[in-house]
Every structure is written in structure tokens, then in C-alpha cells.
């Protein structure tokens, strides 16, 4: 059981040891790289004495006691003097470098003021953990210096005073603290990535990641000694401790978004409490330094430790429930940052405990000042691993979705091909049906026209024969009595027979199945010429180019209209001159035949015009015989199909309808 338990923890142990190993390597390198190389003043040779106040202008003559006899002098006394012997040095720019002091003045052994700094006079609020002072020494270096220090009711770390060359100090600071700017750059790089992700995906997780990276970048930039060399402004370092709770708020908010809805009420309360604490600390830093120092020294450490325990509980619960990559890396990263954050809190906000631990573990004094930012960077590495995992899962989902989409497209394409084949088959059937329908309609119209023409022939023959018989009988009766008059009757009979023969010849022409008649302009021209030769009429024709989509039925209707118009115009309107106009206007073909005779209404039933009217109506056209005019006018309009059909190509067999070529 025990071996099985550890095997189950392997997914967590591997990233945890990886991050801890990186932390140890970075810290070891920084400790070795940032180790100070220079003259160190031995505090065992120092002496100290109490000062009346920071306003003292010269050290006392007597009362000096050994400094080691009062190791907590920097905590218990508000103002005190230190007498520090200086060794001989060949430095060209000797300096006295002082850290861990609030207000300070440096005098040489002759009582001359060499350096002074009072934050109250400059309106400064400082963080002693990042502020240092540099006093310029004369050459040759005096045998000793007297230093006046006051802590101004603030906790002071153990003062550290070194004799150093200015060039060596600058090189040491570059070697020791330049990595802080590298850390700040890495944090800024992470914040840029997080903001870009938030801008594109609108996920609050990336917003809190951005805020956490920004706080890390800020702390890395201001918590180093090198910055003061170029920008002597203590306010950014002073406000750094107020930014720390804001980073904790971002960290808790990220856990809230990652593991929602696990412990959502607890995490939600913790993060808003930490945000409120950060706002209160920031306001106190700007308004009341004493309250700001009190907040950081007393409420923050226990509140942070309690928060850390609750967060650890949430992460353990998430790991036990999910055991996925996100919970593993977040738990490993959180353990690392929790460890370094605890050390940060103890060193910065619990100085007594830190001093006690440092006396027993000297390595703690060597730890990098930006250890929290290093841990934060390692946590961000774990978070980036989680984000990469999320994008990998998203990529897998997109790949699966693309595959499903491709399958759906292929399926829909196959269905489309099937529907297209069915549509083509339906179109073929429809084309065949339309062809059959057109052929039937053509045959029906041909039969109707033949019936009309044969009726017309019958009527003409009957009329001519009856009239001829009457004239011949009259001539027979008058032959003996009035030969001249009888001869006139015979001549009239001949004229009647001749006229009847012309009409019969014209009607017989219509019965012929001649393909030329359906080349509409040519057929109309032949009809006009035959009629003019037979009756002596004059026809002026104007036929514009006609659409190629005119059907046989439409052509036959227009030809029939010309026949009826010429015949009826001569017979009933007395027309001797006609004008034919025929053109297409984009939607329909318009036919108009006008004569110089009078308007007419055919007597009797008007079978020819009636048949023509029915044919026009079947083709959705209009027919007009204008009455009450001084001329005889016949108008026919028929709609036609567009020149090109986008869906259905004409079948080759459509070129013949009822055996008649178009």
C-alpha cells in the first residue's frame, strides 16, 4: 500500500523536484555571483554610545563602550553613535557604504561632517531593505569615523558598514543586482503574453496572470541596490510592500478561475479580503507611515500564513479529485512560491524571528534579496505549462472538430451529388414531358389550322360554285334574248371562278408542311409576295431581329396573324395597302398590321380570328382588332423566354415539333 501511494504521487513529485532544483541552482549561483569582494569592517572593534537626538552636532568625548556588548542596539535605541576605526587603503575613490540605517550623519576624526541624510528633510519614505547610503571619504582616509544613526521608530535591520572604492561598489552592484532587471524583463514578457491572451480570449485567468506578472516585474525592478545608483528616489521601494498583497490577490484569483467551482466561496472570500488589505496598505503608505508599518508588521504575517494554509488545502483537494496536469503543476508551483513567500514574509515583516533564525542558519543571510521574484518566475513557468496544456487540449478538440467537419462535408457532398443526379434525372424527365407537351400542342394547332383552312376552302368553293351557277343560269336564260348581257354573266362567272381558284391556292399553301414557313421572316415574305401577286396589294414590312427562343407555336401564331390580317383587311376593310411592323422589346414580341381601309368586324362567327385568338391566349399573349379607327389595325403580343437558360439546356429533339423543322 505504501509503495502504491508513492507511485500515485510521481506525477506531482517530478514537477515539484524540477522547480525546486531550478530554485536551488539559481539561488546557489546568485549567492556565489553576488558575494561581496572588498574590505569588511570588523564590528568587534567598534564602539557605541547613546545620542541625545539626531540633532547632536558632534560625538561625545566619553562614554564609549564596545559595540558587541549591545547586539540589539539598532532595535532598542532610537539614536546612537558608532565609532568605527578605518584601515589604511590605497583606494582612489574611498567610500563608506552604509545599509540598514534610516537617518545618518558621518563625521571624520576631526569632527567635520562628511555625509548626512535625513529622509524627513527630503520628504522621503524609505524601505530600509533596499535603501543605502554612500559617504565620500577624504584622501588619505581618516583613522576613524563617527556615525550618528536614528531609526525613527521604525524597525531597523542590523546596520552594515563597509569601506569600499566607488568603482568596486559599482562593479559589485552590477554583478549582484543586474539579474533583478533580467527578472523584471522576464516578468514583463510573461505579462505581455498574458495580456495578449486576455485580449483575444477574454478569459479572466489571463487577466490575473497579467496582474501577477506585473507585480513581479515591479518588485524585481525596485527591490535592488543598483537602481539607486541611477535614480535616487525611495518611493517605489517604499511602496513595494503594499504591492505584495496585490500579487497574493492575483494568485488566489488564478486558483479560483483554474479550479472553479472547487471551494469557490472560500477562494472568493480570500481574494477579496487580500485585495482590500492591499488597498488599505497602499492608502496607509501614502497617508500614515506609522499605520502602514503597523499593518505590515502585525496583521499581514498571520493573515498571510492562514491564507497559505487554506490555499494549500484547496490545492491538495484539487489534486486528489482531479489528478490532471493542471492540478499537478499548480500544486508544485504553489508549493515553491509558498515556501519562498513564507521566507519573504519572515525576513521583511517578522524581523525578530528572522534575526533569530539567521544567527543559527548563517546561509539565510546569503539568500538573494529577490528570492520571492525568483519563486514567482518559477510559478509562472508552471502556469505557462498549464496554459500550453490547455492550448494542446484545445488544439486536439479543434482537430477532432475539423475531422468531424470534414466527414460532414464529405457526407453532405455525397448527398448533394445524389440530389444533383436526381435533379438531372428529373430535369430529363421534365424535358421529355415538355417536349411531348410541345409536340402535342403543335399537332393540336396544326390540326386546328388545317380544320380552319379546309373549312375556309369549303366555304370558298361552295361560295364560288354557287355564285358561278347563278351567273351561268342567268346567262343561259339571256343567251337568246340578250346575248350581250349573257356574255357579261359568263365573264363574271369566269372572274368568280378565277378568284375562287386564287383563294383555294392560298389555302392549299397553308396545308403544306414546308419548313421554310417556320423561318418566320422568310415565310412572311413569301406570303406577302404571293398575296401581292394574286391581288395586287402593296405591303411595306419592317421585321426587326427576332429572339432565337421563339417556339414553333409562337412562329405559327404570328404567321397565322399575318394571313388573317391580309385576308380580312382585303375582304372586309377594302385595304389595298398594308404596313407590317414586328419587333422584340426584351419581354415580348409585338406584331402590328395596319391597312388603309376602314376598321372592320368580320361578319358571322369569324372563325379564323376566333381560332387565332384562342391560340394567342394559350400562349399567354394578347390580340387586338381596333375598332372605330380610320384604318384597319391588328395587334398581337406574345411573351418569350430569355436568350439563355441557366438551368435547362434545350434537348436536340426540340428542334422539330410534329415533324416540322424550326
Image (cartoon, rainbow, N blue to C red):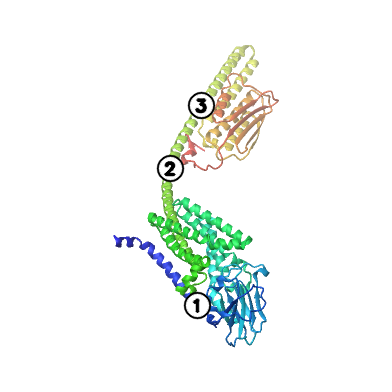
Dot 1: within a 10 Å radius of its alpha carbon, few (fewer than 14), some, or many (20 or more) residues?
A: few
Which label number is shown at residue 660? none
What residue did someone put label 3 on?
Answer: 448
Q: Is residue 641 above or below residue 44?
A: above
Can I make out residue 214 in this image? no
Residue 260 versus residue 441: which sits nearer the camera?
Answer: 260
CB of mark 1 within 8 Å of CB of mark 2?
no
If you read the primary sequence from the N terminus, does the residue marked by circle 3 or circle 1 appear first?
A: 1
Which label number is shown at residue 33? 1
Dot 2: within a 10 Å radius of its alpha carbon, few (fewer than 14), some, or many (20 or more) residues?
A: few
Give the mark count: 3
Under circle 1, the secondary element is helix
Residues at marks 3 and 1, CA–CA distance in whole angstroms: 116 Å
Quadrant assignment for the N terminus: bottom left
Q: Position of residue 80 (x, y in %)?
A: 60, 75
Residue 340 versus residue 57: which sits nearer the camera?
Answer: 57
What residue did someone put label 2 on?
Answer: 419
Q: Position of residue 477 (x, y in %)?
A: 60, 12
CB of mark 3 within 8 Å of CB of mark 1?
no
Under circle 2, the secondary element is helix
Residue extending farthest right = 630
Q: Is residue 573 left or right of residue 274?
A: right
Query: Which of the 4 quarters of the picture holds residue 41?
Result: bottom right
Dot 3: within a 10 Å radius of its alpha carbon, few (fewer than 14), some, or many (20 or more) residues?
A: some
Residues at marks 1 and 2, CA–CA distance in whole angstroms: 77 Å
Residue extending farthest left = 1
Residues at marks 3 and 2, CA–CA distance in whole angstroms: 42 Å
Amino acid at each position: 500500500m505504501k509503495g502504491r501511494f508513492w507511485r500515485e504521487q510521481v506525477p506531482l513529485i517530478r514537477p515539484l523536484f524540477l522547480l525546486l532544483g531550478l530554485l536551488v541552482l539559481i539561488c546557489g549561483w546568485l549567492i556565489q555571483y553576488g558575494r561581496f569582494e572588498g574590505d569588511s569592517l570588523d564590528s568587534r572593534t567598534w564602539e557605541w554610545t547613546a545620542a541625545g537626538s539626531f540633532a547632536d552636532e558632534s560625538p561625545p568625548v566619553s562614554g564609549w563602550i564596545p559595540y558587541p556588548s549591545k547586539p540589539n542596539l539598532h532595535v532598542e535605541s532610537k539614536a546612537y553613535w558608532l565609532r568605527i576605526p578605518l584601515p589604511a587603503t590605497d583606494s582612489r575613490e574611498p567610500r563608506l557604504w552604509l545599509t540598514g540605517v534610516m537617518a545618518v550623519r558621518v563625521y571624520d576624526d576631526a569632527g567635520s561632517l562628511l555625509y548626512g541624510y535625513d529622509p524627513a528633510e527630503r520628504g522621503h519614505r524609505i524601505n530600509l531593505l533596499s535603501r543605502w547610503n554612500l559617504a565620500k571619504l577624504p584622501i588619505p582616509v581618516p583613522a576613524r569615523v563617527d556615525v550618528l544613526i536614528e531609526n525613527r521608530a521604525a524597525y531597523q535591520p542590523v546596520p552594515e558598514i563597509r569601506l569600499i572604492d566607488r568603482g568596486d561598489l559599482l562593479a559589485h552592484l552590477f554583478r549582484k543586482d543586474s539579474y533583478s532587471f533580467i527578472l523584471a524583463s522576464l516578468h514583463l514578457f510573461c505579462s505581455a503574453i498574458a495580456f495578449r491572451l486576455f485580449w483575444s480570449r477574454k478569459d479572466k485567468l489571463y487577466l490575473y496572470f497579467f496582474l501577477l506578472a506585473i507585480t513581479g516585474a515591479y518588485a524585481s525592478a525596485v527591490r535592488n541596490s543598483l537602481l539607486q545608483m541611477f535614480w535616487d528616489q525611495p518611493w517605489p521601494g517604499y511602496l513595494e510592500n503594499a504591492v505584495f498583497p496585490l500579487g497574493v490577490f492575483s494568485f488566489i484569483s488564478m486558483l479560483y478561475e483554474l479550479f472553479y467551482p472547487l471551494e469557490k466561496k472560500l477562494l472568493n472570500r480570500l481574494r477579496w479580503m487580500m485585495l482590500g488589505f492591499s488597498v488599505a496598505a497602499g492608502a496607509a503608505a501614502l497617508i500614515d507611515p506609522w499605520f502602514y508599518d503597523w499593518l505590515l508588521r502585525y496583521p499581514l504575517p498571520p493573515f498571510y500564513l492562514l491564507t497559505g494554509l487554506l490555499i494549500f488545502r484547496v490545492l491538495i483537494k484539487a489534486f486528489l479529485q482531479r489528478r490532471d496536469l493542471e492540478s499537478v503543476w499548480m500544486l508544485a508551483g504553489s508549493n515553491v512560491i509558498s515556501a519562498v513567500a513564507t521566507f519573504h514574509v519572515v525576513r521583511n515583516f517578522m524581523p525578530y524571528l528572522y534575526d533569530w533564525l539567521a544567527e543559527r542558519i548563517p546561509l539565510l543571510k546569503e539568500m538573494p534579496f529577490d528570492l520571492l521574484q525568483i519563486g514567482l518566475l518559477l510559478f509562472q513557468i508552471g502556469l505557462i505549462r498549464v496554459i500550453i496544456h490547455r492550448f494542446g487540449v484545445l488544439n486536439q478538440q479543434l482537430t477532432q472538430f475539423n475531422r468531424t467537419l470534414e466527414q460532414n462535408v464529405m457526407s453532405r457532398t455525397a448527398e448533394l451529388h445524389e440530389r444533383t443526379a436526381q435533379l438531372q434525372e428529373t430535369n430529363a424527365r421534365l424535358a421529355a414531358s415538355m417536349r411531348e407537351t410541345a409536340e402535342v400542342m403543335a399537332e393540336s394547332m396544326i390540326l386546328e389550322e388545317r380544320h380552319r383552312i379546309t373549312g375556309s376552302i369549303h366555304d370558298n368553293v361552295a361560295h364560288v360554285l354557287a355564285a358561278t351557277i347563278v351567273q351561268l343560269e342567268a346567262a343561259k336564260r339571256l343567251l337568246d334574248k340578250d346575248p350581250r348581257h349573257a356574255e357579261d354573266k359568263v365573264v363574271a362567272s369566269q372572274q368568280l371562278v378565277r378568284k375562287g381558284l386564287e383563294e383555294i391556292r392560298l389555302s392549299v399553301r397553308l396545308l403544306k408542311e414546308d419548313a421554310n414557313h417556320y423561318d418566320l421572316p422568310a415565310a412572311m415574305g413569301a406570303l406577302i409576295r404571293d398575296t401581292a401577286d394574286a391581288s395586287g396589294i402593296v405591303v411595306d414590312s419592317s421585321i426587326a431581329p427576332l429572339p432565337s427562343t421563339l417556339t414553333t407555336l409562337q412562329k405559327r401564331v404570328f404567321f397565322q396573324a399575318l394571313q388573317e390580317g391580309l385576308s380580312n383587311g382585303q375582304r372586309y376593310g377594302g385595304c389595298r395597302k398594308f404596313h407590317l411592323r414586328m419587333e422584340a422589346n426584351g419581354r415580348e414580341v409585338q406584331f402590328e398590321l395596319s391597312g388603309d381601309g376602314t376598321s372592320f368586324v368580320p361578319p358571322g362567327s369569324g372563325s379564323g380570328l376566333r381560332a387565332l385568338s384562342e391560340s394567342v391566349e394559350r400562349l399567354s399573349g394578347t390580340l387586338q382588332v381596333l375598332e372605330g379607327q380610320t384604318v384597319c389595325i391588328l395587334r398581337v403580343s406574345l411573351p418569350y423566354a430569355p436568350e439563355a437558360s441557366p438551368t435547362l439546356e434545350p434537348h436536340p429533339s426540340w428542334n422539330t415539333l410534329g415533324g416540322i423543322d424550326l
